Image: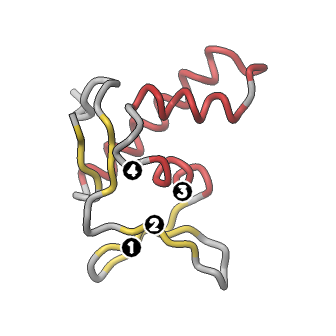
Amino acid sequence: MSAIPPGSARPKLARKVRLKLDRHTGEHWLIYPERGLRLNASAARIAALCQGELQVTELVERLAAETGPMHGDHERERIERDVRTFLESLRERGLLEWIP
């Protein structure tokens, strides 16, 4: 069972975490004490939306809207699955908090 709460919970990067863009390489990183996690473009976009304002369902809808309506429900389901997997990965590392 996933530890991701229902879609109404709002993900927020933990206080110790910062999303940074390396201006030399153009790579996105999550920086936290004495470590860093390099992100691909999709992961960086998800992390950027984790400010504690959007519910998971709203975050997924925003990302789905960015891909365009042509892709339909199948694409939305894939986006939701990828988002939840990524958020769970961040939570397991202590890099994400949940705001009820």
Please report whichever mark, 3 or 4, sits nearer to the chain's N-terminal start.
Answer: 3
The residues tagged by marks 4 and 1 sit, at their Cα atoms, a distance apart of 15 Å
Residue type, mark 4 in image: Gln
For the residues carrying marks 3 and 4, which lies nearer the camera in this image? 4
Element type where label 3 sits in the image: helix
Picture quadrant where residue 94 is located: bottom left
The image position of residue 36, as x and y in percent, is 39, 74
Sequence-wise, which precedes: disc 4 or disc 1?
Answer: 1
Residue 22 percent coordinates (x, y): 58, 79
User: Which residue is located at x 54 percent, y 21 percent?
Assistant: 77
Disc on res. 51: 4
Q: Residue 44 shows which numbered tag?
A: 3
x and y percentages locating residue 61 in the rendered image: 55, 27
- Mark 1 belongs to which amino acid? Ile
Q: Position of residue 39 (x, y in %)?
A: 52, 62
Which residue is painted at 48% across and 34% down in the image? 59
Circles 2 and 1: CB atoms closer than 8 Å: yes
For the point 24% across and 29% down, the residue is 5
Amino acid found under the numbered disc labelled 2: Leu
Badge 2 crowding class, 10 Å Cα cut-off, few under 14, some 14 to 19, many 20 or more, is some
Disc number at residue 19?
2
Question: From the viewer's perspective, is residue 21 above or below residue 60?
Answer: below
Check whether the beta carbons of the residues at disc 3 and disc 2 lie within 8 A of each other: yes
